């Protein structure tokens, strides 16, 4: 899931960044944890590949 955010205001570069949220399930407890990061839109696939 990706959501647009504006980490750099009033510049045209702000549209090049997205907020990504990755869900992980703990094998031990079954609980979910979330990892949020603001990355460049070209690096989104790399974030989810980790």
Image (tube, rainbow, N blue to C red):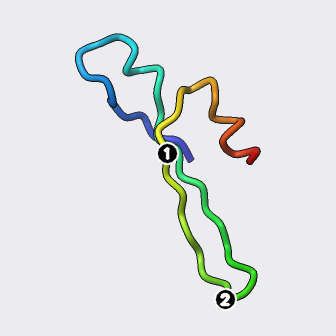
Count of marks placed on residues: 2
User: Which residue is under mark 1?
Assistant: 37
Residue depicted at 35% across the width and 11% down the height = 12
In the rendered structure, the answer to whether residue 10 lies left or right of residue 28 reads left
Q: Position of residue 19 (x, y in %)?
A: 46, 41
Residue at the (68%, 78%) spot, across then down: 26
Residue extending furthest left? 10
Q: Are marks 1 and 2 in contact (CB under 8 Å)?
A: no
**Relative height, residue 1 to residue 7 (above, below):** below
12 versus 34 height, above or below = above
Residue 4 falls in image quadrant: top left
For mark 1, does the 10 Å Cα neighbourhood hold few (<14), some (14 to 19), or many (20 or more) residues?
few
- When asked about the image quadrant of residue 15, the answer is top left
Residue under the image location 49 percent in, 52 percent down? 36
Residue holding disc 2 = 29
Label 2 environment density (alpha carbons within 10 Å; few <14, some 14–19, many ≥20)? few
Q: Position of residue 47 (x, y in %)?
A: 66, 41
Place of residue 20 in the rendered image (x, y in percent of width and height, measured from the top left): 53, 44
Q: Residue at x 74, y 48 (%)?
A: 50
Q: Secondary structure at mark 1?
A: strand
Spatial CA span between label 1 and label 2: 24 Å
Counting from the top left corner in percent of width and height, residue 48 is at 69, 45
Instruction: Assign a secondary structure to mark 2.
Output: loop
Residue, far bottom: 29
Nearer the observer, 7 or 2: 7
Residue 23, picture quadrant: bottom right
Choose the circle earlier in sequence order: 1 or 2: 2
As drawn, the label of residue 5 is none
Residue farthest top in this picture: 12
């Amino acid at each position: 899931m990706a959501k647009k955010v504006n980490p750099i205001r009033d510049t045209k570069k702000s549209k090049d960044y997205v907020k990504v949220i990755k869900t992980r399930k703990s094998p031990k407890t079954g609980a979910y944890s979330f990892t949020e990061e603001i990355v460049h839109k070209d690096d989104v696939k790399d974030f989810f590949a980790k």
